[in-house]
Amino acid sequence: MTDLLLEARGLCVDYGSGPGAVHAVADADLVLHRGEVLGLAGESGSGKSTLAFGITRLLRAPGVITGGEVRFYRPGGSPVDVLEADEPLLRVLRWSQVSLVMQSAMNALNPVMSIRTQLTDALRAHRPGMSAAQRRARAAELLDMVGISADRLGSFPHQLSGGMRQRVMIAMALGLEPQVVIMDEPTTALDVVTQREILEELSALRDRLGFAILFITHDLSLLIEIADTIAVMYAGRVVERAEAKALFRAPRHPYTLGLLSSFPGLHGPRRRMTGIPGSPPDLRELPSGCVFHPRCGFVLDRCASASPPLGPPPGGRGRVVACWLHDGAQSVPEPLAKPEPDHIGSTL
Amino acid sequence: MNAIRLPRSPKILTGLGLLLGFAILAIVGPWLAPDNPSTSFHNSPVPLPPSAAHWLGTTALQQDVFSQLLSGGRSTFLVAFLAGLVATALSVAIGVTAGYFGGLADDLLSMLANIFLVMPALPLLIILFGFLKSSGSNDDVIIGLTIAVTGWAWGARVLRAQTLSLRSRDYVDSARLIGERGWRIIATEILPNLTPVVASSFLFTVLYGVGTYTALAFLGLVNPDNWSWGGMLFFAQLANAETSGYWWWFVPPGLAVALLGTSLALLNFGIDEFINPRLRVAGLTRRAGRRQRAGARPPRRYELGLTPVVRTPAIRPVTTTVGGGHD
């Protein structure tokens, strides 16, 4: 894959510093290619939003990035080291190259400004050459793109439904045709029908405009449908990353397996739903060794003492997992050893 | 978590320490005073500078400044805290009632508060105190109550606005639906949520009380037998102590007023920090980092949109050894 767009290596994020610091993200790797949909899944507090906001350096105090590399590869330009970038450079990058769809459209839209004003705001800042008429035309085009009729331009946020507000947010994020759109649980507050419509529109827009999406959600079943690649996070670490289909059909990490068996499938034989026993660890006092071992059903002796590296499992194509079960020293339990699906679609 | 975490920011500790010192001074000061503050000792025509006999020198009337300073704290403290207590009680009663019940009660009480807000407090107090002084009834309690009457309105406005926003919250609605009475809702659902506002409004009013009482005494509107720091400044001013360089006469009372005000302001900042955990975390981590020294240097400044990057030498074991590349 040559079209590398965004790359994070060994990113660490702490909240606070000193002995009381919470290590919210530890040593996380993330690679995003042109036009790819990368899903970031994990339960609440697993650090998925922190990771995404760390990449864009948008964390609030007391968030501190304590290590790692983040590179953004500008099309036709030199790569940008985001962690070394100064504010003017970040300001140019943000929204024109990397935009963000926030979780609650309710709070993200300013209630006293019309949709038109809020849509044209970024255009005015980033495209000084545009005339007011051009900006208005572009705003109408954007609204039309997300399936809202252009005569809604004069509306205020309270006059729109929740789904429409979220569409406006997406339209805003696409306004400057960015390379990467980060979506932080964009459909969590919506009902499943609206959610479905928006996701389908999003996929169509992605096919047309070719932007990449970093999609953050706790809804793994949603990701399996929309994402090309899925990274599963647990306690601030990426524990498994694989093609969506491979992750769904043949999970390799016990945590992924637990997540997958906590929602029912529509097709196939009936199976017993099981949750994951226990609750997520306190990020200030992580368990020794593998962070998941106290809740793991396949725990080995060394899980409590040594932390497994994130690496390719034997026979795994294009996937990585952080689990001692796959180091070849013992036989892998049957649920974690399902064969890779025959046909793995390309990431595009 | 304990029910009440002990706030331990340096602001709160300093403010609390200073205030405690002044409180002790207010209680025992008059007894500790080596001399009667009104007694004249010598026959010198000019104030004497600090000496072994008079630690802070003497006034033009040859009274002991140190004794005046120790005796003057009690009335300042008493007046300011009485004013703060009464004014806060008034503002809670009027502000919360107006905000919660609304309608005609709100209109009338808000009008009352507005009237008191637009009345210029100091000229009014000067007139009132002139009257009180001539009628001979100006002891600390009456002075405190008078200051309270002119100082409650601002707090009432703030509390009314906050109550307006609180009374439409879901938990208040549900309390109303299960049939709780208005006063019970105010006491159990609304007032606890107003605590930070009430506390900071109280400290502000006490601060206002210190300033107002000192100002009025400085203007000579308080019975001069009743020693206070403002009264000391009044006599120092009368004798041109500033221009004549009798610093030992006016600096100690001025400093005492300033420090008392500082302690109250610091406590108020501390309350801010206590309510807003973001302020607290940032402050505490910065201190923890300073204490650490050797380890990671915490960022000097957090800025929205520019998350600081502080590279720590690997404290935690590096987990990834295999390059986790996707392709």
Image: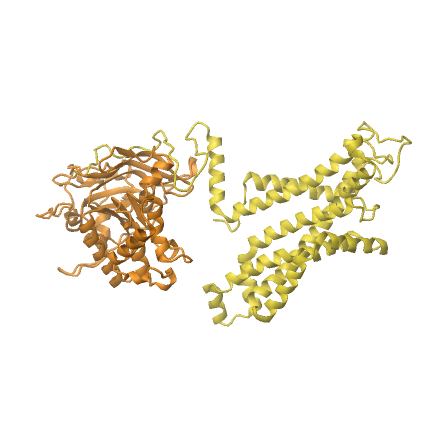
Placement of B12 over or under B134, stated as above or below? above
Chain in orange colour: A
Residue A20 is situated, as x and y percent measured from the top left of the image, at 43, 39
In which image quadrant can residue B258 be found?
top right
Q: Is the N terminus of chain A in the top left, top right, bottom left or bottom right quadrant? A: top left
In which image quadrant can residue B11 be found?
top right
Q: Can residue B31 be seen in this view?
A: no
Q: Name the residue rendered at 45%, 64% in the picture.
A: B170
Placement of B53 over or under B111, stated as above or below? above
Give the colour scheme of this rendering. by chain
Q: Name the residue rendered at 34%, 30% in the picture.
A: B314
Q: Name the residue rendered at 48%, 71% in the picture.
A: B178
Among all residues in the image, which is located at the extreme right?
A: B43
Q: Name the residue rendered at 50%, 49% in the picture.
A: B2
Q: Which of B211 and A98 is in front in this view?
A: A98
Decide if residue B2 is on the left or right side of residue B98.
left
Residue A253 is situated, as x and y percent measured from the top left of the image, at 21, 45
Decide if residue A346 is on the left or right side of residue B242.
left
In the figure, the shade used to draw chain B is yellow
Q: Is residue A310 visible?
A: yes
Residue B226 is situated, as x and y percent measured from the top left of the image, at 81, 46
Q: Nearer the viewer, residue A144 or A261?
A: A144
Q: How many labels does the image show?
A: 0
Residue B253 is situated, as x and y percent measured from the top left of the image, at 74, 38
Placement of B94 over or under B259, stated as above or below? below
